[in-house]
């Protein structure tokens, strides 16, 4: 609740990860991912731990259900998590319902030493004590302890089987109430379409969906509370601006399909220098000849094209971005072949003090989105941990000491 702080020294850790690929190779990828996750938990030792997963169960949920069950059992029963004696798990397993399925998985772990913690019942409109470990799945729409929605199909009509949406839970730690929102926004379906306009049509779709979520959270149905939104936002750099900047002196060649005359590739060549190919752009390919542009100084030079949150500047605040770009995050797809193998290191983040109501942006974890119940909202950006081609998907994390 606004104006009151939670118990001093209570540490909160927020983790988000798109885990779709973990279920393609559960014997290797899941083990590596869980090992890294447990190391992060051990390093931070949070009292309250939230893990938001997107694409939970992979591309074919029905075929992966046994792997899903194993993954959940491992999390709930592992020695690394034995001090977390209370847990709530919400899995959207209703894969047969095109109208409702989001493939979101939300895990909440409470340390045995944590007192004065309760969860909000959205139907009864009151808080309830949290005891034991409980798993909710299948039809989450009827579960009163959360709000879940899939975005309307007309938000992204070209995708017949979109699974994008959000899940919201509310918690009260001592006298501090806050919402945790697991969100998955729409991706760029085609680089060829994304670069046609600035902002792209996909950016407009994400804007509409994120705006819808924010409006739902601050509507009049419930008392307002601070909230963290962390998930897979699918934000990208402004593709048209990036291409025009990288290929200022290039000429463009258009390649069309012989049977449909549809554009399938754009080739940008230098005007001189033997017309060297600078960039090849396809539906799922963004192959630029100088990859160092995306790595030098953690890609800072590209931040001017990071515009997707600017439309929310009066509602949201974002911390400075200092992490390097990574595949499938804010950049068009790079021309990199993944081979699998190595494991990325997860950087340990400091545990800054968080006050309620928040005032200084530096007080917030670099990976959570916090919106206080006030006219001027603040948001911090979900920062991915270091990742290099050839590694498995790494979770993003944030920590805070209330």
Image (tube, grey):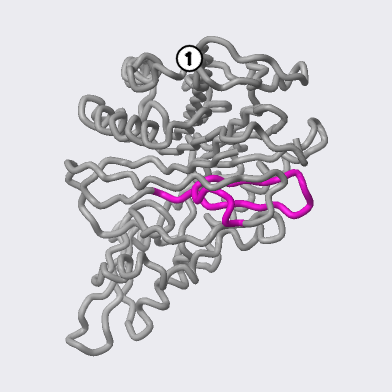
At which x and y percent is residue 195?
45, 66
Q: Nearer the viewer, residue 393 or 207?
A: 393
Give the quarter of the image for residue 316.
bottom right
Residue name at image x 55 percent, y 57 percent:
203
User: Looking at the figure, which quarter contains the N terminus?
Assistant: top right
Residue name at image x 41 percent, y 38 percent:
18
Residue name at image x 61 percent, y 15 percent:
130
At which x and y percent is residue 71?
34, 20
Q: Main secondary structure of the magenta part?
A: loop
Give the quarter of the image for residue 82.
top left
Magenta span contains residue 333 = no
SS for tag 1? loop
Q: Nearer the viewer, residue 224 or 158?
A: 224
Q: Is residue 358 above or below residue 192?
A: above
Q: Is residue 83 above or below residue 241?
A: above
For the record, the magenta segment spans 361-384
Is residue 94 among what the camera can see? no
For this orientation, the residue located farthest to the bottom is 272
Name the residue carrying label 1.
85
Q: Nearer the viewer, residue 118 or 275?
A: 118
Magenta span contains residue 375 = yes
In the picture, measured across the screen, residue 17 lies left or right of residue 314, that is: left
At which x and y percent is residue 265?
31, 64
For this orientation, the residue located farthest to the right is 220
């Amino acid at each position: 609740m606004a104006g009151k702080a939670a118990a001093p020294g209570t540490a909160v850790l927020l983790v988000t990860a798109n885990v779709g690929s973990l279920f393609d190779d559960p014997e290797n990828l899941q083990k590596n991912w869980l090992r890294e996750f447990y190391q992060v938990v051990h390093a931070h030792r949070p009292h309250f731990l939230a893990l938001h997963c997107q694409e939970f169960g992979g591309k074919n949920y029905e075929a992966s259900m046994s792997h899903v069950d194993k993954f959940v059992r491992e999390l709930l029963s592992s020695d690394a998590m034995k001090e977390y004696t209370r847990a709530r798990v919400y899995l959207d397993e209703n894969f047969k319902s095109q109208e409702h399925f989001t493939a979101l998985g939300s895990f909440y772990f409470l340390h045995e030493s944590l007192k004065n913690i309760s969860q909000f019942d959205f139907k009864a409109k009151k808080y309830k004590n949290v005891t034991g470990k409980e798993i909710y799945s299948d039809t989450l729409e009827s579960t009163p302890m959360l709000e879940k929605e899939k975005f309307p199909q007309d938000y992204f009509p070209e995708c017949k089987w979109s699974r994008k949406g959000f899940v919201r839970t509310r918690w009260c730690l001592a006298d501090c109430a806050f919402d945790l929102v697991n969100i998955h926004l729409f991706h760029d379906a085609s680089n060829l379409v994304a670069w046609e306009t600035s902002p792209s049509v996909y950016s407009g779709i994400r804007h509409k969906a994120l705006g819808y979520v924010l409006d739902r959270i601050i509507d009049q149905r419930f008392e307002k509370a601070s909230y963290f939104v962390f998930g897979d936002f699918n934000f990208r750099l402004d593709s048209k601006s990036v291409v025009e900047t990288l290929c200022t002196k290039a000429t463009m060649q258009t390649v069309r399909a012989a049977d449909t005359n549809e554009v399938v590739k754009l080739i940008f060549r230098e005007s001189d220098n033997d017309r060297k190919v600078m960039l090849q752009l396809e539906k799922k390919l963004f192959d630029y000849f100088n990859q160092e542009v995306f790595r030098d100084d953690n890609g800072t030079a590209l931040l001017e094209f990071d515009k997707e949150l600017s439309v929310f500047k009066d509602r949201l605040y974002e911390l400075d971005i200092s992490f390097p770009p990574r595949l499938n995050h804010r950049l068009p797809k790079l021309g990199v072949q993944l081979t699998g193998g190595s494991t990325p290191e997860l950087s340990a983040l400091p545990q800054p003090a968080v006050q309620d109501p928040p005032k200084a942006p530096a007080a917030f974890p670099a990976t959570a989105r916090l919106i206080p119940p006030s006219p001027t909202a603040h948001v911090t950006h979900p920062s991915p941990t270091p990742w290099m081609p050839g590694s498995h998907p790494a979770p993003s994390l944030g920590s805070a000491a209330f």
